[in-house]
Image: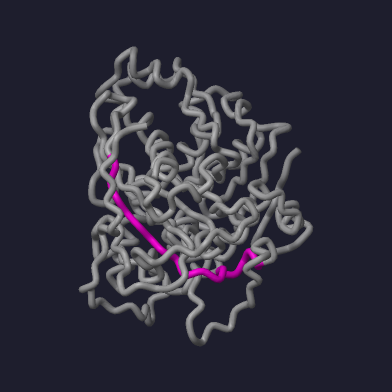
Amino acid sequence: MRHWYIASLLLFAACSSDDKETSTADTSGSGADTTDTSDTTGSGDTTEASGDTTGSGDTGSGDTGPTFDLTAPLSWPVGEAGPFVVGYRHWEVTYTSPGNGEQRTIGINIWYPATEKTATSPNYLNLALFRDTDVYVDAPPAPPVYPSGKYPVWAHSHGSQAYGGSSSDLMRHLASHGWVAVAPDHTNNLFNQDVNPRPLAFYAERPTDVIVAIDQLEALPDATWLAGIADTSRVVISGHSFGSFDAWALAGGTYDTTLIQQKCENGEFPDCTPERVALFENGFPEPRAIAVVPMAGRMGADWRSDDGLLSVNIPVLLMSGSNDDVGHAATFAQMPGKPVTWVDFAGGCHETFALGICSTLNKARGYGLVNTYALSFGRQQMFADSSVDAILDGTQVVSDLVTLQKQP
């Protein structure tokens, strides 16, 4: 899978540089490629990114993992892939941009629990470089296993010049445990499509993309495969790098429009108008968000006042790597009394939380830590699952690589 490695290095360089509408849904799994004959063994390549073949959700022959009681999903080990195969669908949706009033088309990526594999795996962004051989297009959905009779939902926002599937290892892990995960492709900030300099309108579009992605799950027609059984009333939202900026905004972080106006006066944006600056006065709080997970990123101090995060009243799980100081310590300190847990992974890099590229932390180990803490946090917030409390208060040591701080 040498092609994965090269593409991942390019994405690493890009991501490291950062900080209800009508739709035309194609649920046929567009973006799939069944003719790619590239090597999928990954032999000799210890740093390949997306397309990792660890087999999340794969319960095929030779699997020696745990036995799962399908009537008790909260008993499943959070650090192990769950019992389900991972299904996938992709389509595009067009909505009216809040930033400039123009029509904006984005990709929607959905990962969900499935009962069996299909013959087709997706290529994210329709690029063979980003083929995910652990995911199966149009796989038959597994029935929900949680007491509500619905799938819990997790939404994700990718980093700069990445794509919705760039954190697919986490999306697969969640889907293998019976969750539905949704992530938009942020048009004009993708691996194969980026606009520079970024317009101010774009900073309103990115969090709106996540809202629209959740809306898409909520508005599925009755005849559609997940219609009515993805519980969009309560959603966990994560973001990597630039996506963390979106996660904070959706959590209720408030902007300082004086600072934004200063950016405009300094010529930072090519499209400043009083109306576009005013878009940020009320922010982009998402009432369906019950918790957020910002990874390797923050809502920068040049966008908000020092107390701009004190308006966040839902639980937060901060994730960072010791080799990627993006200001998590300052963020943690600026939220006294707020329900914030911060986990830092020794040796972790910026891409530990997405592509897995990190010379100082083994990819599989890094993914394992991210998946363990993210799913633990999701279960605690979504289901009041006390079985993971010890992981999230630090009394259960998951790894000697983890430093955990918690407040209040």
Position of residue 61 in the picture relative to residue 88 (left or right): right
Look at 52% across and 35% down and name the residue there.
Answer: 248
Relative height, residue 198 to residue 275 (above, below): below
Name of the residue lying farthest toward the front: 223
Q: Is residue 294 visible?
A: no
Asked whether 78 falls inside the magenta stretch, the response is yes
Look at 67% across and 50% down and name the residue there.
Answer: 383
Asked whether 204 falls inside the magenta stretch, the response is no
Q: Is residue 250 visible?
A: yes
Look at 62% across and 41% down and name the residue there.
Answer: 316
The x, y position of residue 36, in whole percent, is 23, 73
> Considering depth in this image, is 248 or 388 the residue closer to the camera?
388
Look at 69% across and 65% down and name the residue there.
Answer: 75
Position of residue 164 in the picture relative to residue 300 (left or right): left
Relative height, residue 238 to residue 368 (above, below): above
Q: Quadrant of the C terminus?
A: top right
Position of residue 158 in the picture relative to residue 197 (left or right): right
The x, y position of residue 266, in whole percent, is 33, 20
Q: Quadrant of the N terminus?
A: bottom left
Query: Which stretch appears magenta?
Result: 76-93
> Considering depth in this image, is 245 or 148 the residue closer to the camera?
148
Name of the residue lying farthest toward the top: 274
Relative height, residue 214 to residue 280 (above, below): below
The x, y position of residue 269, in whole percent, is 29, 25
The x, y position of residue 191, in whole percent, is 28, 51
The image quadrant that residue 73 belongs to is bottom right
The image quadrant that residue 210 belongs to is top left
